[in-house]
Image: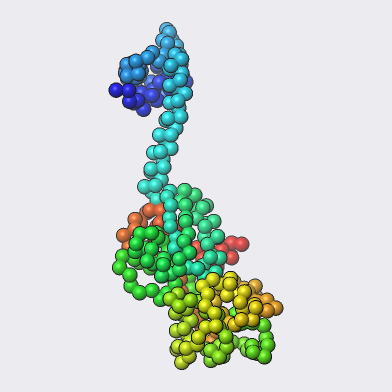
Amino acid sequence: MRHLNLDQLRTLIAIADLGSFSAAAQSLHLAQPTVSLHVSELESRLGVPLLVRAARRAQPTPAGAELVERGRRLLRDVDEAIDAAQRRHAGLEGRVRLGVSTTGLVVDLLPPVFAALSQRYPGIEVSPSFVGSEGSVAGLQAGTVDVAIVSLPQPAVPGVRFTPWLRHDMRALVPAQSAQWPAVKRATPAWLAGRPLIMNEPGSRMQALTMEWFARAGFAPRARIEHNYDTAMRGLVEAGYGAALLPLLGDLATHASPRVRVLPLSPRLVRHLVIGQRANEARDGPAARVAEVLLAWSPERAQAKA
């Protein structure tokens, strides 16, 4: 058998570095006979002399020097492997698949959240998938998503738990003032229902939320254009194709332009985002670490630090 014993290899390297069996024994906190036994067993296993022994000095043979050089790399790799395994067990390393909505607001939130994650847990790699709320929840159930940012309402899902995260007001983005779009202070369901609308696609949580808002006032408008990407929806508003109801954060003036007005909704419409996880997920695993940072982060805190 030619398998290496790592303790014996560590002993050989200590002798090469310190020059004597006694110094190596003291450094490794071993009895000197144990050090001698390590070397003799290692030489016997390999079938080659590894040290030249003098009265008070021990030096590696050419074969011993080769083994010492390669042994240093081997022990370093072993130490790194042990550290990686311990970090993985502690939830400090690993890959986390994050399911997120396609709305621009959620996409805009990701860079600062990722920055916070990389500072706190640099060993965790987050891979986002823009599959929407429904796809994210389905991924949690199927095991293809580890953490999800989804919007309410969500039905009770076996094996999945949701934790409240953020809430934000929906606003109406409308084309610049014209005969078709007169100046108003607030956008109501009645005012918007008779005008061309740009909405999210059927089946999305945003479309359901918008239609429920209209339905409570007795309206069921049809969209002129259906699209799930906020940036494209805003571009269509700028082009005068219609109005869109979108979640916005920060100073509303930054979302307005000479071709777009931002109006509050009356009655108010609030979108709620939650963090979804599998109920049986390890509480100290990488997915739990990502959820922890998400739940601790908020746009208000980020703005306060800026």
Residue shown at the point (34%, 64%) measured from the top left: 141
Above or below, 103 against 9 in this view is below
Residue shown at the point (52%, 57%) measured from the top left: 114
Provide residue 222's location: percent of width, then percent of height.
Answer: 50, 86
Of 97 and 184, nearer the camera is 97
Q: Is residue 191 left or right of residue 68?
A: right
Of 27 and 97, nearer the camera is 97
Q: Is residue 108 visible?
A: yes
Residue shown at the point (31%, 60%) measured from the top left: 280
Q: Is residue 172 left or right of residue 203?
A: right
Q: Quadrant of the N terminus?
A: top left
The image's colouring method is rainbow
What is the quadrant of residue 81 in the picture? top left
Provide residue 228's location: percent of width, then percent of height.
Answer: 51, 73
Provide residue 45's location: percent of width, then percent of height.
Answer: 32, 19
Q: Quadrant of the C terminus?
A: bottom right
What is the quadrant of residue 202 in the picture? bottom left
Mark count:
0
Of 23 and 179, nearer the camera is 179
Residue at the farthest right position: 258
Q: Is residue 138 left or right of residue 130?
A: left
Above or below, 11 against 274 in this view is above
Q: Is residue 32 left or right of residue 101?
A: left
Above or below, 26 against 274 in this view is above
Of 197 and 269, nearer the camera is 197
Q: Is residue 301 visible?
A: no
Above or below, 201 against 276 in this view is below
Provide residue 115's location: percent of width, then percent of height.
Answer: 54, 56
